[in-house]
Structure formats: C-alpha cells, structure tokens
Image (cartoon, coloured by chain):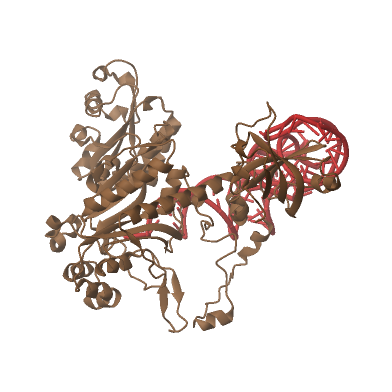
Amino acid sequence: MLKSHGCGEIRLSHVGQKVQLAGWVHRRRDHGGVIFIDLRDASGRVQVVIRSESIPDATKSIANIRDEYVLMVIGEVHERLEGSRNDDLPTGDIEIKVEEVEVLNSSKTPPFPINQDITITESTRLHYRYLDLRRDRMTSNMRLRHKIIKHIRDFLDERDFIEIETPVLGLATPEGARDYLVPSRIHPSSFYALPQSPQQWKQLLMVSGFERYFQIVKCYRDEDLRADRQPEFTQLDLEMSFVNESDVMQLNEELIISLLEKYAFGYEWNTSFPQMTYATAMEKYGTDRPDLRYGLEINDYSDVFRNSEFKVFSSAIGNGARIRGIVVPGGATLARKSLDSFIDIARQAGAAGLVWIQINGSGSVDDISIDDIKSPAAKFLSLEEIIQLANIANAVRGDLIILAADMDLITSRALDAVRRDAASKLELINSNRLDFVWITEFPLFEWDEGESRWSATHHLFTAPIDEDKKYLDSDPSQVRSRAYDVVCNGQEIGGGSVRIHSRDDQLQILHLLGISTEDAQEKFGHMLDAFEFGAPPHGGIAWGMDRTVALIAGEQDIREVIAFPKTKSAVDLVTGAPAMVSEDQLSDVHISVKPTDEVNSSRDISEEI
RNA sequence: GGCCCCGUAGUGUAGCGGUCUAACACGCAACCCUGUCACGGUUGAGAUCGGCGGUUCGAAUCCGCUCGGGGUCGCCA
C-alpha cells in the first residue's frame, strides 16, 4: 500500500505517529513559506502542512502542486495549535507535518470545481461523470446506496430469503413495456429480450420450492425517460410462497422502516403504513399515488349544484358528470396569475376549465355577502349556493375553493394536478416527512382505447380478488386485483401482487386479454406448464431501488443516485453509447440496417463539452 | 410523437435590438506572502454569445430550422 492510513481516519490519538498518506489535493492554501493542503481520499480529508524549510530541495515542485493532483506524503501527526483547530472537519484537531512529498500524478484543471457544491449543467456532469462522482454529494449518495443495498441483503438473509440470479437474456413478451432486443448470432432472425423484470423467473423459483427469493437486479425498459425513470434501473425483486397480501406488505413495511431508522436522517414517518384502496385514492386525491404530506382532499359537491342556475354545472350533472373540488386554505390571497395557472394546469390535464371561488372578509361563512366573493362565476352562482358549498366544504373566509365539472376520469386528473401545484405554491409540503401508504384493490384490467381490448393494469400474472371473479366474463372492469403499491410522497416506489398459480385461471386471464390459447402456449407455455406441477400460492413485490435511494438521500432525481446514468435521450455521455457498429458485427448477428439519410453525426458535440 | 424551459469565458450567472471592442464571481496564470482552512494581496490571460439561415442600417438580444440538455403529456404490465 502507498498509504498507512486513510486521510479521514487520523485523530488526536495518532499524534506523534509517523503516517504515510495518499490522495487528491482537495484545496491548497499557499502562504509562501508554508503551504496547507487538504488531502482527500475515500476516507475523508486531512490538512497537511508543508514548510519549504523542511523540504528545501522540493520547494519548487511543491509550489506547482494544484487542485486534484495525486500526492503521497509522509509525515508526523501533530495536534493543531490552540485557535487553529477546524471544527468543521472530523480531522480538524490534528494536521500532518510533511517530511516527504511525492507527486504520483498531476491533473489538468477540472472542467468544474470538485471542492464546491454548485450547480453544473447536466450534460457536463454526465460527460465527466468520473469527476462528478468525486464531489461530496455524489460520493455520499453512492455510499448511501451501498449501505441501503447491504442492509436489504442482510435483512432478507436473516429472514431466510436467498438471492438467486436470473437470466438477462430472455424471451420477449407481449404486453407491457417495449423490450430491449439482443440479436442471436447462433439463431438467425431470433432475438433475446432484456428483462423488464425477473417476474416470470421468480414465479418459477416459487414452483421450484425456494419459498423465499429476492434479487437486487437491473431491469430494462425501452420507453421514454423521466426524472424518475431510466432505461436500465435497479429493482429489489422479491417473492414468497404461501402468503397473502398482508404477509408481503408487513414484511416490506418492516424492511422499509428498518432502513429509514438507519439512514433517513432528519425525516419523520409513520411507524405503520396506512392502506388505501385504489377507489378511495382516486376519489380523494384523483391519483393512485397520492402525496399525503398535505390535505387539499378532493370532495364531491354535486349536490350543491344539482339544480343550479349555473348551467355549466347543472347540465354537466345531468349528463352524468360530477362537480368535484378542493378547498385551498388561505387561497383567497392568491393573485389572479396563480388562479389562471391552475386553469392552465387543469386544461393540460384535459379539463375544459375550472371555477375558482375566493371567500374574503371576516366572520362566519353563513354571513357571506356577494362583495366577499371573488369568482369568474360569481354572477351565475347564488349566495345560498356559495354558503351551502362553503359549509359542506368546511371552508372559511380566506379560503379558495376550486371546482371542476366533468366525468371522474377528467376531474381526477385535473384536480390531482391542481392539488399538487397548489400545495407547492402555498408551501404546504412538509419536506421532512416521508408519508408512505399502501394502495390496494387496483382494477385488474384497464380498457386500451388504442387497441380496443383489455390490458392488465399491473401485469398479467396478478390474481383477481376472489369475490370479483364472477365479473371476469360479464364485466372485467369490475374486477379488482390482489395488487398493492407502496407510495411515498406522491411517488410509486414499489408494487406487487398475489399471483395466479393455477393454469386454468391464468389461461382465463390470457384469453380475456385477447391472447389465444396457441399464443399463450407459445409465449407463456413455460408458466402454464409449471403451474401444473404443484405451483404453491405465492406473491411478491418489486421496489424501484433508484427511487428508494433517492428518497432517502433527499434527491429529486434518480440520476443523482446512479453512478453512470443515461440522458433523457437514453445516451451514455461518458462512452457515447449507443453507437453504430461495424458491418462485420452486424453480419455476425444477421442484421442489415436500413440506410438512414441523417445518419447522426450527433456525437460530434461530445468532444468539445 | 405533442407541448414547455434552457444553451453567453473552464464553472456559475448578468446583459434581452445600437453605449457589448460582452459584465460580475469563482476558477486559471504570474508575482508576493511562515498558520491558513471559501487564506490574503497585486497584475494578467480567457467567451463573438450551441450551430446554420433569416429579419434589420445594426442581433448575444427578434424569427425559422437544427443540435444538445432538462421538464411534462402520450408511453412506462
């Protein structure tokens, strides 16, 4: 080893010892005759002091040392002089008096500062990701990620789970996300698909009798990216036999809480997670991943307007719509601009518009006069209606009521969007909270307008709730599933279900999804066959590890907890992947590529960043 | 694929039709400095404003296209 200690390990107890350290120059302070260098390595930082008089022949080369140079130093640990300690540094009580210095490598001036936490353009960071990862923020995120993953492995190991690796090269499946394909060299015209998740393998492992399996594993989906979505991402995949939903939920709840207790500093959370049905979530929050850190619940105010003179509302109700809305406490002070932006947001979500009502003045809402009301619909609404509305809504003066009239699907989307925007505008979000909730009883199917057929909401191995099986033939929309999602602060971080384990039941679902027996046998024959050999009842869950780590790290973007993430257009800026390959490589895998006019020479920019 | 935001020295920003031969901070270079820790001081170099085209007497500033980054909808079982 080129070092006897880590820079960050040295303490008062080492005073008097001779140590050999190696690391990077984090910062230097050159005072002429004495140079202070904060030397950084993976363990932390320590101040080393170089006096020209103690190393006379190296004086010149030492003066040339710059940030990010790699040094090896030998010296004695000294207690710092009174008054020159640094309380911000764990090693701040001591310093190293250098006797020998060796420059192991020099460094160009980095493209962005390593020793400061400042905002840098995403593309520059990604291009020089190896330097970005030197920065404290990324270093601590990576270490946190490691700790979390290790904790999960230990936790599950203690509970008799075993981690089993499953294939990366697999069979493309219909349904679900677009697959990443890998051409086969040995079998012309045939392709593997990268796994969207090890779903089928883990179910087969249950048939094999392992009973408790998990895997921390990369999954791949060729879909468009988001701040919380990468084309390759990491799942904690887990499956258990002889369980029902509550067994899986309870175990995972324990796991999450044990993680939070250890790593989620500065946050508060519920010690047991509430459960909410999908129907309730949609009714109260307009979404299946509600953010419970604030109120602003959606309510139904149709009764107030059933016979209203305001035809926009009353006729909508006549056409089967409902009037739903939220009360924004203190919203009466919001400026017109904010109110207009709510309308924009609602329109983007597909609503025709919104009606907002601000209630001003003081005193009981029962004494509201028309002068207290500010609303574009003021002249269409009667005072009685507004008073009735305020009472039902528990609104007080100073509040804002936002109403939307449409079919539930539309009002849910619109009010969800407005609710989130209002919460952030009025700063109602307590950022110290982690509010977890289980969402249950999802619909098993959703109607796919584009393809005019039913598709699986969760995935096609999810079991229906027993009492709803009677609707499978008559009205699939009525069938609820035994699926559950873990949602935290408005973000889905995991989801799972109790699975189907009988061949007949599975075939029935496949048929309902429009998959013929023949296709079913071709694409899912292995599952159907396996179910005939004593498949145990089983269920499981998969968590988005990137999202989980980001949540605990307090990061909004999963890129911040992934060492080498891809850009929004799925490009790796470090290596430039994806890129064209040689004709030889293509011919090996029996592929000929369509000539493209604009064979992108788009990689040019990466050189000059 | 739709909509939206961003792109100015190495980095982060300012400038948003003429006074910009582009400003500020950090960084960088040189010199000075033996106790600093975002060290300090003096001096200096460095961008033609992502690219292309257009409007205009005149463009970093307006318009179009394009490239790149990001957000969002679709999509993501």
> Which quadrant holds residue A461?
bottom left
* Total labels drawn: 0
Relative depth, front residue between A132 and A452: A132
Is residue A155 in view? yes
The chain assigned the colour brown in the figure is: A
Quadrant, the C terminus of chain A: bottom right
Relative depth, front residue between A89 and A345: A89
The residue sitting at the front extreme is A16
Is residue A352 in view? no
> Which quadrant holds residue B13?
top right
Please indicate whether residue A21 sits to the left or right of residue A513 in the image. Answer: right
Please indicate whether residue A575 sits to the left or right of residue A192 in the image. Answer: right
Relative depth, front residue between A535 and B43: A535
- Tell me where residue A69 appears, x and y as whole percent: 72, 50
Q: Is residue A380 positioned above or below B27 on the image?
A: above
- Tell me where residue A202 appears, x and y as whole percent: 31, 65
Quadrant, the N terminus of chain A: bottom right
Q: Is residue B51 positioned above or below A258 on the image?
A: below
- Tell me where residue A157 appears, x and y as whole percent: 35, 56
For chain B, give the colour.
red
Q: Is residue A13 positioned above or below A187 on the image?
A: above
Please indicate whether residue A412 sits to the left or right of residue A56 in the image. Answer: left
The residue sitting at the top extreme is A363
> Which quadrant holds residue A450?
bottom left
Please indicate whether residue A398 sits to the left or right of residue A302 in the image. Answer: right
- Tell me where residue A163 appears, x and y as whole percent: 36, 62
